[in-house]
Image (cartoon, rainbow, N blue to C red):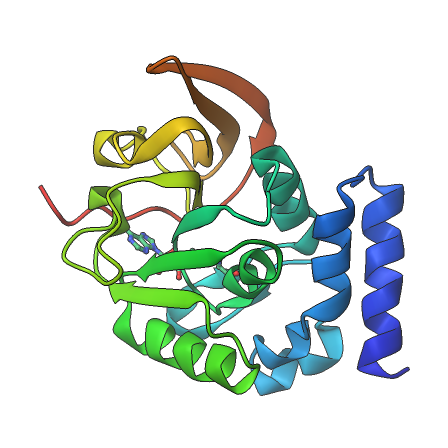
Amino acid sequence: MRFEDQRQLLVSELRSDGITDEAVLKAFGSVAREHYVLPEYQIYAYRNKPLPILDKQTISQPLMIALMLQHLELMADDIVLEIGTGSGYEAALLASITKEVCTIERIESLSLSAQRVLREDGFRNIYFRIGDGTSGWQKAYPPYKEFSRIIVSAGADMIPEKLTAQLAEGGIMVIPVGPGTTQSLLKITRQNGELLYSEHGACAFVPLIRTDT
Ligand code: SAH
């Protein structure tokens, strides 16, 4: 079956699994996941499964990404901060829906490979930083101090304070938090200056590695 047809089947699967945000479904229907996986895994690109990428990291399961993006309640004028660029696939989805995406990856080779694919796929509204994302968007262009949406796509043992500090008023952040190999998906919103927290089920992400102190 052609990738295009497999992609539309994945969208139907996400719909029957409870994804109702039309902007999210449309993004999944347009981004070529086969470009973001390793060549040997391209035939599996549209299985609803995580897949290995370089440096022992993974491209997340489509349903997990879709749930996170749905929790983010993305709007066309959002400026999004993503921690864990990885393959670049989630950045592509985010950039298809919102105005700009700033994404941070600690592994240089992964960031450079994501930058190349995203450029080839025509994305011009994504900015990259290589480093520890737990300290947020610092010393990078554009010089944003806060974001309307923040997504962390690696499992954190605690919520990085420098990240919540960059969540704008009325903003939404999603982050998997937990002590071990499984986490709980947290949604954090900032309302009237205060942070509100809600929990949205179990998940399993590769660890968020903190190097900045
Ligand atoms: N969103 C990615 C998923 C990547 S997996 C995709 O669509 O493919 C999580 C990524 O987070 C890994 O690439 C890992 O290297 C990165 N990561 C882990 N800790 C990090 C940190 N402190 N700062 C930035 N990136 C980090």
Residue beneath the point at 50% across and 46% down:
78
Ligand 1 is in which quadrant of the figure?
bottom left
Relative to 207, say whether 140 is above or below.
below
Q: Position of residue 12 (x, y in %)?
A: 89, 54
Identify which residue, 74 or 48, lies in the foreground: 74
Identify which residue, 128 or 110, lies in the foreground: 128
Relative to 61, say whether 92 is above or below.
below
Residue 47 visible at all: no
Number of numbered discs overlaid on the protein picture: 0
Residue beneath the point at 48% across and 69% down:
87
Quadrant housing residue 61: bottom right
Quadrant housing residue 149: top left
Relative to 185, say whether 94 is above or below.
below
Residue 77 visible at all: yes
Q: Where is residue 57 in the image (x, y as percent from the top left)?
A: 43, 63
Q: Position of residue 85 (x, y in %)?
A: 41, 62
Q: Return the residue found at the far front.
A: 77
Residue beneath the point at 72% across and 60% down:
28
Q: Where is residue 126 in the image (x, y as percent from the top left)?
A: 42, 66
Quick one: quadrant of the N terminus?
A: bottom right
Quick one: quadrant of the C terminus?
A: top left
